[in-house]
Amino acid sequence: MPTAVPTPTPVPTTSPTYSFVNCSIVVGLSGLNCSEYDEPAELTVINAAAASTDSLDEIHIYDTSCETVTSTGRRRRLSGVGDSLEITLHIRAPAFSSSALAAGVVADLNTAVEDGSFAGLLQDSNMTAFSGVSAEYVSSTDAAAVPTAMPTLITMMPTDRKSVV
C-alpha cells in the first residue's frame, strides 16, 4: 500500500505585541554650558541615562541635542531655577507604545535625578565639564509612535504520516 508523503504545515507563532517607537526626553541640567557639550560629554550623558533606566541601553539613545534655557523661559520661571540647559535624548526602543516608553524612562530618570545618582554618574566621569553639574528635572516632549514591522518566524513542521488505503 502506498503511504502519503508528509507535507510541511506552518506552525503558528506569536508575534511580538510591541514595536520600535520613538520618544524624546528632556533632562534639565545646571552648571554646564552647551559650548562644553561635545562628543565625549554627549557619550557621558547617554551612558548615565542608560545606566539610570531599566528600559534603555546606550544603543537606544540615537541622538542628543543641547539648548540653553534662560530664566525667562516658562519652565525656568515656574521651577525657580536660573540659567541652565536642556539635553534632549532622542530614543528609539521596543515598547508597547511611545507613551509607555516615555513614561517608563521619565519615571526612572526622575528617580535618578531626585536621588542624585544621575548627576553623580556625570560627575564620576572626571570630565571637567561635569564637575559642578546638577540635574534639575526630567520631562517628555513629543512621544509619537513610529511603528516598525517586526519579523514573524514561521516554522515548517511535517504532518502526521497516514496510510492511504
Image: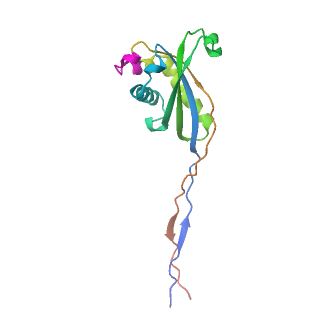
Q: Residue furthest front?
A: 35
- Pick the quarter of the image with the C terminus: bottom right
Is 11 one of the magenta-colored residues? no
Q: Position of residue 113 (x, y in %)?
A: 50, 19
Q: Total marks drawn?
A: 0
Q: Position of residue 81 (x, y in %)?
A: 57, 10
Which residue does the image show at 51% across and 21% down from the upper left? 111
Q: Is residue 110 above or below residue 148?
A: above
Is 129 one of the magenta-colored residues? yes
Residue placed most toward the observer, 145 or 6: 145
Which residue does the image show at 53% across and 18% down from the upper left? 85
Q: Residue furthest bottom?
A: 1
Residue placed most toward the observer, 4 or 116: 116
Q: Position of residue 9 (x, y in %)?
A: 55, 70
Quadrant in which residue 11 is drawn = bottom right
Mostly what secondary structure, the magenta segment? helix
Which region is colored magenta? 120-130
- Residue 55 can be seen, yes or no: no
Residue placed most toward the observer, 75 or 70: 70
Q: Is residue 137 above or below residue 92?
A: above
Which residue does the image show at 64% across and 37% down from the upper left? 144
Q: Position of residue 64 (x, y in %)?
A: 50, 30
Which residue does the image show at 60% across and 13% down from the upper left? 76
Residue 129 shown left or right of residue 149 in the figure: left
Residue placed most toward the observer, 39 or 108: 39
Quadrant in which residue 37 is drawn = top left
Q: Is residue 77 above or below residue 113?
A: above
- Residue 69 can be seen, yes or no: yes
